[in-house]
Image (cartoon, rainbow, N blue to C red):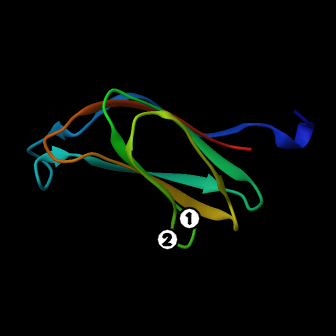
Amino acid sequence: MSLFNRKSILLSESEFTLGALDYTIQGAYDNVKTYPLEVKAGKKVFVEIKTSAPIDVSLVDTKGMNAKFKENYEGGIFGPVEVKEKGIMTLILGIYRGEKSQVEFTAWME
């Protein structure tokens, strides 16, 4: 690996429950989480996901268009997704209402 292809960690989230019952939010289930990722043009974004049950994963580009989507994702490395312009990309994790999953992820850019 050369000096210019270093791994740059964007976000790391330790274990949390996706789909937990929470009466304080609308719909009573915390089944969708979004995470902003500040990215640079010309790089590639990767997300390593560990999950106890299948979830849906989406990476939205800086213009708000879906760059990559995977339904019933059981874990592994999601990506690479090429960054076309500098800005904020969004990682979206979701699960159906009534289902739960323990999720842990790390997002990075190379």
Q: Percent from the top left, x then y, of residue 20?
A: 19, 36
Q: Which quadrant would residue 55 be assigned to in this image?
A: top left
Q: Which quadrant would residue 110 be assigned to in this image?
A: top right
Per the image, the residue denoted by label 1 is 61
Three-letter amino acid code of the residue under disc 1: Asp
Per the image, the residue denoted by label 2 is 64
Q: Percent from the top left, x then y, of residue 23?
A: 8, 44
Mark 2 lies on a secondary structure that is: loop
Q: Quadrant of the N terminus?
A: top right
Closer-to-camera residue (47/27) = 47
Closer-to-camera residue (6/46) = 46
Q: Residue at x 15, y 45 (%)?
A: 29
Specify whether 55 is left or right of 25.
Answer: right
Are the residues tagged 1 and 2 within 8 Å (C-beta)?
A: yes
Closer-to-camera residue (64/58) = 58
Q: Residue at x 21, y 47 (%)?
A: 96
Three-letter amino acid code of the residue under disc 2: Gly
Mark 1 lies on a secondary structure that is: loop
Q: CA distance from mark 1 to mark 2?
A: 5 Å
Instruction: Tell me if residue 95 comes above or below residue 102 in the rendering.
Output: below
Image label count = 2
Which dot marks residue 71?
none
Q: Residue at x 22, y 34 (%)?
A: 100
